[in-house]
């Protein structure tokens, strides 16, 4: 039967070999996949809530990969592994590690020097993480949880609400979210910060 997915605007299509990394072979529809992934992500969220992490660990390649793994390890064989193909978004696959290191170094600098307000630091990190696009899929969800971990564990503030909506389904909230991302791409980060706190 195989997995035949439809993609919405803003989603990164999987290559055939990435599709083959599906661990639950009975899944055949987007709805079934979303359900399994969501259960996996909820376990990852519980994991982040129940632990304390040092800033230097959160802002490390190891943690970025581990969080993605925790979010998708029950669903995808490639969970927590950098993508091996180029996509319609993101840096060249060979530059992922280098670009992620630059982002981490920048974020540590922002924190140490209070370059931006705390919410803005977390959202800037999230936005650039999506631009790098480290993984075959799940980059938006992963980057939002990374922002939540940064704001809650480093700055000890409440998690972002992200409009209290499921941003993986077609909705007005998803459209507003993608519009805020596009404004961030042009250097206007405030709409995305505002959306994260709606």
Image (cartoon, rainbow, N blue to C red):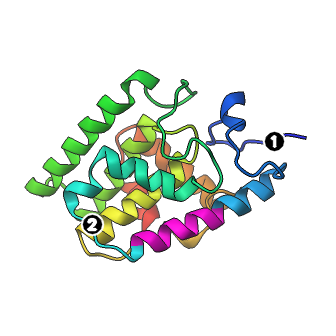
Q: Secondary structure at mark 2?
A: loop
Query: From which residue to which does the magenta span run?
Result: 38-48
State the residue at coordinates (79%, 57%): 31
Q: Position of residue 33 (x, y in %)?
A: 74, 54
Mark 2 is surrounded, within 10 Å at the Cα level, by few (under 14), some (14 to 19) or many (20 or more) other residues, namely some
Residue at the extreme left of the image, as rendered: 113
* CA separation in Å, label 2 and label 1: 37 Å
Q: Position of residue 109 (x, y in %)?
A: 14, 48
Residue shown at the point (24%, 36%) measured from the top left: 102
Asked if residue 15 shows in the view, the reply is: no
Vertical position of residue 22 compared to residue 44: above or below:
above
Task: Answer with left or right where residue 149 lies relative to residue 183.
Answer: left
For residue 75, the mark is: none
Q: Residues within 10 Å of mark 1 (few under 14, many from 20)?
A: some
Which residue is tagged 1? 3
Q: Residue at x 51, y 46 (%)?
A: 139
Q: Nearer the viewer, residue 83 or 77?
A: 77
Circles 2 and 1: CB atoms closer than 8 Å: no
Looking at the image, residue 122 sits to the left or right of residue 110; the answer is right
- Quadrant of residue 38 in the image? bottom right
Q: Is residue 72 left or right of residue 148?
A: right
Left or right of 178, for residue 149 = left
x, y percent for residue 195: 46, 62
Magenta-drawn stretch contains 43: yes
State the residue position of label 2.
53
Q: Residue at position x 32%, y 37% from top?
A: 100
Q: Please, what secondary structure does the residue beneath circle 1 have?
A: loop
The quarter of the rendered structure image containing the N terminus is top right
Tell me where residue 61 appears, x and y as whole percent.
32, 44
């Amino acid at each position: 039967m195989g997995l035949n997915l439809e993609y919405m605007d803003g989603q990164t299509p999987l290559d055939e070999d990435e599709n083959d990394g599906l661990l639950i072979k009975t899944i055949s529809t987007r709805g079934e996949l979303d359900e399994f992934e969501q259960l996996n992500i909820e376990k990852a969220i519980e994991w982040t809530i129940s632990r304390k992490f040092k800033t230097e660990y959160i802002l490390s390649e190891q943690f970025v990969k581990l969080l993605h793994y925790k979010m998708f390890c029950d669903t995808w064989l490639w969970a927590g592994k950098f993508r091996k193909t180029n996509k319609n978004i993101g840096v060249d696959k060979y530059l992922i590690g280098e670009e992620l290191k630059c982002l981490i170094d920048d974020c540590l600098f922002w924190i140490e020097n209070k370059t931006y307000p705390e919410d803005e630091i977390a959202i800037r990190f999230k936005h650039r993480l999506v631009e790098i696009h480290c993984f075959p899929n799940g980059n938006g969800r992963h980057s939002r949880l990374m922002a939540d971990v940064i704001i809650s564990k480093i700055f000890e503030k409440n998690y972002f609400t992200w409009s209290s909506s499921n941003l993986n389904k077609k909705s007005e909230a998803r459209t507003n979210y993608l519009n805020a991302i596009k404004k961030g791409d042009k250097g206007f980060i405030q709409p995305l910060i505002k959306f994260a706190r709606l």
